Amino acid sequence: MDKEVLSFVVEKTNELINAASCNSETKAAAEAWLAAVGTDGEAEATKTYVKELEADIMPIDGLIGFAESDAGAQVFGADHARVVAAHAKEIKAAGAKYCDCPACAAVEAILNKKESILG
């Protein structure tokens, strides 16, 4: 991948790692990819990383369903779960395909460069 794309993905990967909403699986994949950058294993690590990102990004309908569920109420708290669901519906109406939390926003930005990343 070219230097500009690599720099962008490294920046977004660091944002992802530092996002409070990043789960441990995604964080581990991001850290493993960063460790592989510049090595012989970079290309394979990149493929693995992209697969993990695709699996972990939260589709907007999934967020709405979760926020409106009992499990969502337990995670967010009942009042905040309603706020999250309303926000998710609002951004969906505006065209969002995914959750816009810091982790998902970083993942979406990276995946938007998927073709350039995978070459």
Image (cartoon, rainbow, N blue to C red):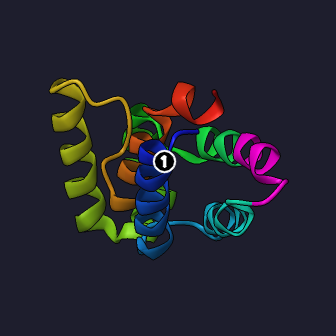
Rendered location of residue 51, percent (x, y): 70, 39
Instruction: Please tell me which residue is depicted at 42% across the width and 57% down the height of the picture.
Output: 12
Amino acid bearing label 1: Lys
Q: Closest to the observer: 118 or 4?
A: 4
Instruction: Please tell me which residue is depicted at 48% across the width and 51% down the height of the picture.
Output: 9
Whether 101 is drawn above or below 31: the answer is above
From the image, which quarter does the N terminus lie in?
top right
Q: Closest to the observer: 23 or 52?
A: 52
Residue 106 visible to the viewer: yes
Q: Would residue 19 be counted in the magenta stretch?
A: no
50 vs 100, left or right, is right
**Highlighted magenta segment, given as a residue range:** 39-48
Specify few, some or many for label 1: CA neighbours under 10 Å numbering under 14, 14-19, or 20 or more.
few
Rendered location of residue 32, percent (x, y): 73, 66
Rendered location of residue 64, percent (x, y): 36, 40
Q: Could you tell me which secondary element the residue under label 1 belongs to?
A: helix
- Which residue carries the number 1 mark? 3
From the image, which quarter does the C terminus lie in?
top right
Residue 67 visible to the viewer: no
Whether 47 is drawn above or below 106: the answer is above
Q: Closest to the observer: 32 or 39?
A: 39
Q: Would residue 43 be counted in the magenta stretch?
A: yes
Rendered location of residue 61, percent (x, y): 41, 32
23 vs 11, left or right, is right
